[in-house]
Image: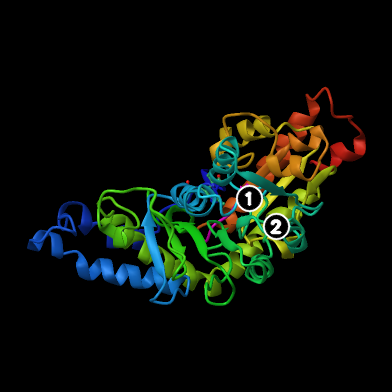
Amino acid sequence: MRVYLDNNATTIVDPQVKTVMDPFFSQIYGNPNSLHAFGSESHVDLNNAMEKIYAGIHAPKMDSVVITSCATESNNWVLKSIYFDYIMNGKKDHIIISEVEHPSIIATAKFLESIGVKVTYLPINEEGLIEAKTVRDNITPKTALVSVMWANNETGAIFPVQEIGDICKEHGVLFHTDAVQAIGKVPVDVQSFNVDYLTFSAHKFHGPKGVGALYIKKGKEPSPLFHGGSQMGGLRSGTLNVPGIVGMGKAIELAVDALDFDMPDVKELRDRLEDALLEIEDTFVVTPREKRTHNTILISFRGVEGEAMLWDLNKSGIGASTGSACASEDLESNPVMEAIGAADDLAHTAIRFSLSRFTTEEEIDYTIGVVKDAVKRLRGISSSYAYTPKNHESAL
Ligand code: C6P
């Protein structure tokens, strides 16, 4: 059996999304900026897709939703443009991010630090959560931007972006949220709270890879990262990814619908998996269920190296991860576990299971059996895990 439980890394393209994209590869393939019929043929579908994308995040028409190649690009764009627009000219010198942002924020912030920008990294608490008051405590008159993700990709922890947005507004500071793990998991309405920039990426909600977006509130348009063309109102040059945009439109429509219809089922399956795994002795989950997205579990099995567990799972056809796919090759311990100050023996044992609306009960029951066997086997050969009949029994 093959079971895909790494949906925070990427998701299967929904067949309905693939169907609407298909004509735009070899039937309707003109450049939408060309003046002939080949170019204009895609305009109606592009407009419809953009309408769906605006509707998916409740963006008003006067604001911009600029299509990018991925969330990494959107995140780089926000931070670097803040440097060009507010810091380079000496008006401000400081940005605030959290210490558990995605590498596309952390690495960009570190780059900016290397050229003189002051960066504050907000801590998380023992539940893996950001406390909004830490934002207030760290804002200075020189702060240009606060960037805090909506939902964490490792734990699923949902951060208080509404409160953080209010604090930013009170202090006249721009607010960006990386909502990559929020779309399709929580209702996203940019008009319901104060937010200037919001990032998302289609492949996290059953859309295609290679297409993302940045929502920009009217009047807060950043300097472009890419110059050269008039596409996207000159804010993001480059030939439009027509199949990608059409696919993202359909995908966000389905993802928002699924919030009502499929989310309760996904949550039930996630809880079934989590309940069964927590029966194993010496097993820990950091963030309480009601404070994280309904599809995610980051769980530590004491004495079981994350990579060894992944190996066993992979042999049995199960795809999970030790955390963010972008950092999977460095074999470092999980950054969230490090940030909460977990002891080394736990930080190296974190495994992320992330479900989707395509996950089945049969797959979850199979996974429970495989994980229990793997924990038993790996603890049995571990030199660091103290064997006791009690904890051995619980893994059976
Ligand atoms: N996180 C994960 O395994 P791209 O790949 O550019 O479309 O998305 C980047 C990105 C940005 N922000 C968050 C919160 C994310 O989770 C991701 C992608 C994957 O967790 C791959 S590293």
As shown in the figure, which amino acid type bears the numbered disc 2?
A: Thr
Where 73 falls versus 176 (above or below)? above
Above or below — where is 304 with respect to 294? Answer: above
In the picture, measured across the screen, residue 36 lies left or right of residue 45, that is left
Q: Amino acid at mark 1?
A: His
Label 1 environment density (alpha carbons within 10 Å; few <14, some 14–19, many ≥20): many
Query: Where residue 126 sits: x, y (%)?
Result: 82, 51
**Which residue does the image show at 57% across and 42% down from the upper left?**
103
Q: Is residue 377 above or below residue 338?
A: above
Q: Which residue is mark 2?
A: 140
Q: Is 275 part of what is drawn in magenta? A: no
- Taking the view exactly as shown, the residue that stands out farthest to the front is 90
Q: Spatial distance from mark 2 to mark 1, Cα to Cα?
A: 8 Å
Q: Main secondary structure of the magenta part?
A: loop
Per the image, label 2 sits on a secondary structure element best described as loop
Q: Position of residue 132 (x, y in %)?
A: 73, 63
Q: Earlier in the sequence, mark 2 or mark 1?
A: 1
Relative to the observer, which residue lies in front, 144 or 262?
144
Residue farthest toward the left in the current orientation of the protein: 36
The range drawn in magenta is 353-357
Color scheme of the displayed model: rainbow
Q: Position of residue 53 (x, y in %)?
A: 39, 68
Q: Position of residue 333 (x, y in %)?
A: 70, 34
Q: Which residue is mark 1?
A: 94
Left or right position of 261 against 63: right
Q: Is residue 135 or residue 301 the one in the foreground? A: 135
Toward which corner of the image does residue 140 lie, by quadrant?
A: bottom right
Whether pointer 2 and pointer 1 mark residues with C-beta atoms closer than 8 Å, the reply is yes
Q: Is residue 356 magenta?
A: yes
One can see residue 69 in this view:
yes
